[in-house]
């Protein structure tokens, strides 16, 4: 089973690059005897496109005041592009998942806080929002696949959530976990992926000023395809660290192994800091495609946030520091 997981995995990036390689992936699934499953999963995607658009009870909170200390450095990506070109494997391993994602029910939405905390708890997302100071920040977003955008996220500092959770002195890492529900997320029927999606940060990263819990986008509640109702933004790291639709925050002593790292540790490491000098094993990270202009621009060290975060990695060995 594990061997099969690795094989199907090697296709992730190529799928994105062209239809031809996408077809190639189907051939491999077929060879593994999984062709039937894959075909039915693919055809069910999008069928829930027009699920009732229930009103978001947090709508009246937006827009929130902009924190001017975070600037994009280049023009914003149009909302239409940022909300229709997405990565959210729960709804399909391609970019056009925005309609399929409407099947996700985002209320009631309960978040669990557990592990190394003074007291484990569950809290409804609207109660959590009421406790947090919301603001807007313009952040650059750099996907490991070498495309990028500049967007106005609304939300609150992750360090405020950490403070609210009261981790014990044993807590060294924060693990976040996405919802799990095969009935709304057809991608989760693809059993060769290690669902649920998880991501992790060190406590120092999670309490860095830049680490942001996103709850809104372009002055409105976060769209489902973007990871409603709660999603992470750590703009100095590759996009896959920006876990969507979070239901659980666990504090641990041990470093977690996240979704992509389980699938392919040599390509999607724990640190995942944006670094133009370190190639992905299959392509250069020196430049990126801006979604607004479709032009290639140079990639910056830590995605341009070195001043804020480089100190976090001083103690790491050279190989670890550079490893994406
Ligand atoms: N749960 C979950 N979170 C996820 C992903 C995913 O597939 N599932 N994809 C990640 C990747 S690779 C990127 S680049 C960003 C994309 O966010 P966007 O669709 O808002 O641009 O979400 C990240 N968060
Ligand atoms: Mo990504």
Image (spheres, rainbow, N blue to C red):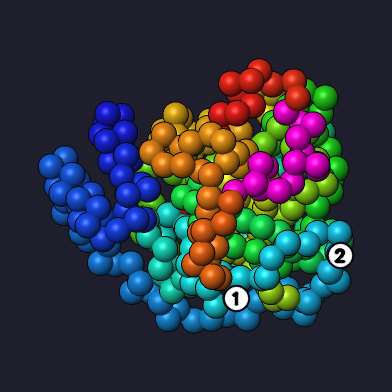
Residue 252 part of the magenta-drawn span: no
Task: Indicate which disc, 2 or 1, sits on the residue closer to the N terminus.
Answer: 2
Q: Position of residue 288 (x, y in %)?
A: 53, 54
Q: Is residue 283 left or right of residue 222?
A: left
Instruction: Tell me which residue sits at (76%, 35%) in the image.
Output: 310
Instruction: Point out the stretch of residues depicted in magenta.
Output: 299-313
277 and 114: which one is in front?
A: 277
- 302 w.r.t. 37: above or below: above
Instruction: Tell me which residue sits at (65%, 76%) in the image.
Output: 56
227 and 127: which one is in front?
A: 227
- 267 w.r.t. 49: above or below: above
Q: Residue furthest top?
A: 317
Q: Secondary structure at mark 1?
A: loop
Q: Main secondary structure of the magenta part?
A: helix
Give the residue at mark 2.
68
- 156 w.r.t. 175: above or below: below
Give the residue at mark 1.
78
- Point out which mark residue 121 bears: none
């Amino acid at each position: 089973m594990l061997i099969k997981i690795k094989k199907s995995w090697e296709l992730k990036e190529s799928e994105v690059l062209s239809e031809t390689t996408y077809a190639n992936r189907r051939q491999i699934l077929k060879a593994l005897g999984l062709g039937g499953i894959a075909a039915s999963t693919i055809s069910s995607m999008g069928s829930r496109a027009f699920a009732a658009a229930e009103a978001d009870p947090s709508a009246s909170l937006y827009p929130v005041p902009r924190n001017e200390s975070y600037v994009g450095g280049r023009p914003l990506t149009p909302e239409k592009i940022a909300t229709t070109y997405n990565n959210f494997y729960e709804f399909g391993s391609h970019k056009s998942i925005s309609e399929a994602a409407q099947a996700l029910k985002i209320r009631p939405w309960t978040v669990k806080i557990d592990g190394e905390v003074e007291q484990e708890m569950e809290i409804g997302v609207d109660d959590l929002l009421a406790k947090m100071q919301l603001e807007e920040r313009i952040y650059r977003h750099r996907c490991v696949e070498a495309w990028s955008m500049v967007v106005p996220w609304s939300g609150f500092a992750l360090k405020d959530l950490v403070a609210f959770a009261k981790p014990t002195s044993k807590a060294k890492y924060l693990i976040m976990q996405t919802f799990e529900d095969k009935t709304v997320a057809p991608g989760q029927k693809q059993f060769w992926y290690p669902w649920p999606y998880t991501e992790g940060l060190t406590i120092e990263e999670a309490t860095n000023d830049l680490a942001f819990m996103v709850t809104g986008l372009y002055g409105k509640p976060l769209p489902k395809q973007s990871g409603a109702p709660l999603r992470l933004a750590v703009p100095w790291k590759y996009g896959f660290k920006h876990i969507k639709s979070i239901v659980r925050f666990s504090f641990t002593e041990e470093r977690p192994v996240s979704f992509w790292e389980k699938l392919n540790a040599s390509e999607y490491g724990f640190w995942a800091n944006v670094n133009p000098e370190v190639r992905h094993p299959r392509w250069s990270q020196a430049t990126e495609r801006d979604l607004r202009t479709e032009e290639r621009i140079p990639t910056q060290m830590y995605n341009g946030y070195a001043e804020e975060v480089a100190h976090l990695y001083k103690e790491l060995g050279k190989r670890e520091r550079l490893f994406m």
